[in-house]
Image: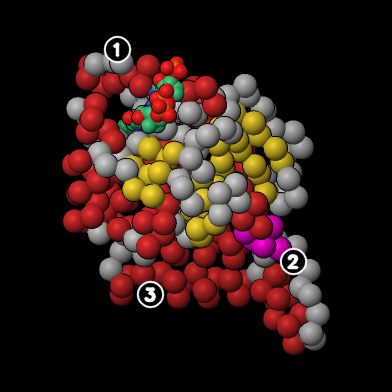
């Protein structure tokens, strides 16, 4: 890996490298940060760069204005057809955006709907402010969620509750999302980004390799049986005994000092 000194910044996405994390802000406030294909490809590019950047341990993603995101840009989709999607596979850029090895922390205020809800749910840590509205209203457009909504929402809140929201298009609040286990931290209005940054700064103090493997192990739990997951976790745990940081972490503890990790 290498340190990336300067990231591309875009009109529809501000990208700021902070101390130990990358801050992405969706910047289409006039359309409630609707996720155009262009915006999604910019997010994907920034995420890819963050993955390759030695100095970055997590990505914080948030929205500018009164929404995190109201979903995929309906204007972008209006004139598409099955054939044009199948032929050009435009949506594959969503897969690029959602495949990141480093932890992603979503700071959500206002609305997280449709693809915006899916982007928030794909994050590893989801911080939401009270009053935020979540939902998968695609059914109102005579489509269904396409970026994991049917799968991630069911896993997070259970099949019957997910079915209710997906079939009716009804929205639910951040407080409901928190009580159903979808949201990691519920904070007062206006505080989502502050809390997400607090978490990113904590992660920045850790050894990168253990951060990456912890994310991989937790995500594996969503795809495996318990026995497979326990075996996988054990292998990752053992592999960490090959790092200098593991030695440093234990030595520092025993000598009652703060560890100084080198990400090696
Ligand atoms: N797309 C385009 N423009 C949008 C938008 C969207 N999703 N959401 C809002 N806007 C625009 C509005 O058109 C309006 O623009 P102007 O009229 O001012 O030009 C502006 O943002 C402000 O919106 P409103 O005037 O509607 O504001 P309100 O406060 O009255 O209402 C709202 C806020 C969030 C309740 C409302 O805007 C709304 O219902 N928005 C649409 C929400 C929605 O239906 N979202 C789902 C979209 S479908 C896939 C990946 C992803 C997806 C599918 C497949 N693959 C990988 C295969 C995702 C699909 C979707 O997300």
Local secondary structure at mark 2 = loop
Which residues are the magenta region?
199-205
Provide the residue designation for mark 3.
230
* Quadrant (top left/top right/bottom left/bottom right) for the C terminus: bottom right
100 displayed left or right of 20:
left
- Mark-to-mark CA distance, 1 and 2: 52 Å
- Mark-to-mark CA distance, 2 and 3: 27 Å
The quadrant holding residue 243 is bottom right
Residue 102 appears in view: no
Q: Is residue 179 above or below residue 227?
A: above
Mark nearer the N terminus (1 vs 3) = 1
121 displayed left or right of 101:
left
Cβ atoms at labels 1 and 2 below 8 Å apart: no
149 displayed left or right of 129:
left
The residue that appears at 42% across and 52% down in the rendered structure is 174
Labelled disc at residue 79? 1
Tally of numbered tags: 3
- Mark-to-mark CA distance, 1 and 3: 47 Å
Query: Callout 1 environment at 10 Å: few (<14), some (14 to 19), or many (20+)?
Result: few
Q: Which of the two residues, 234 or 191, is positioned nearer the viewer here?
A: 191
Provide the residue designation for mark 2.
261
Mark nearer the N terminus (1 vs 2) = 1
Q: Is residue 165 above or below residue 211?
A: above
Local secondary structure at mark 1 = loop
Q: Position of residue 145 (x, y in %)?
A: 28, 37
Any magenta on residue 200? yes
């Amino acid at each position: 890996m290498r340190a990336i000194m300067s990231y591309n910044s875009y009109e529809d996405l501000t990208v700021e490298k902070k101390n130990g994390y990358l801050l992405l802000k969706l910047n289409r406030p006039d359309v409630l940060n609707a996720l155009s294909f262009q915006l999604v490809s910019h997010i994907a590019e920034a995420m890819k760069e963050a993955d390759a950047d030695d100095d970055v341990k997590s990505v914080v993603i948030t929205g500018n204005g009164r929404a995190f995101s109201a979903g995929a840009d309906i204007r972008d989709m209006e004139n598409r057809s099955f054939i044009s999607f199948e032929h050009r596979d435009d949506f594959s850029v969503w897969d690029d955006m959602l495949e990141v090895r480093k932890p992603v922390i979503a700071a959500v205020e206002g609305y997280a709907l449709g693809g915006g809800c899916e982007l928030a749910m794909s994050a590893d840590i989801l911080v939401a402010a009270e009053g935020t509205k979540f939902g998968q209203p695609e059914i109102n457009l005579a489509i269904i969620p396409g970026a994991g909504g049917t799968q991630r929402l069911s896993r997070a809140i259970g099949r019957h509750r997910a079915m209710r929201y997906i079939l009716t298009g009804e929205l639910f609040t951040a407080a409901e999302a928190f009580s159903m286990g979808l949201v990691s931290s519920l904070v007062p209005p206006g505080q989502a980004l502050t809390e997400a940054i607090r978490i990113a700064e904590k992660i920045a103090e850790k050894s990168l390799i253990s951060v990456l493997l912890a994310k991989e192990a937790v995500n594996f739990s969503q795809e495996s049986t318990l026995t497979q997951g326990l075996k996988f976790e054990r292998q990752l745990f053992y592999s960490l005994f090959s790092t200098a940081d593991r030695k440093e972490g234990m030595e520092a503890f025993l000598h009652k000092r703060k560890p100084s990790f080198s990400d090696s």
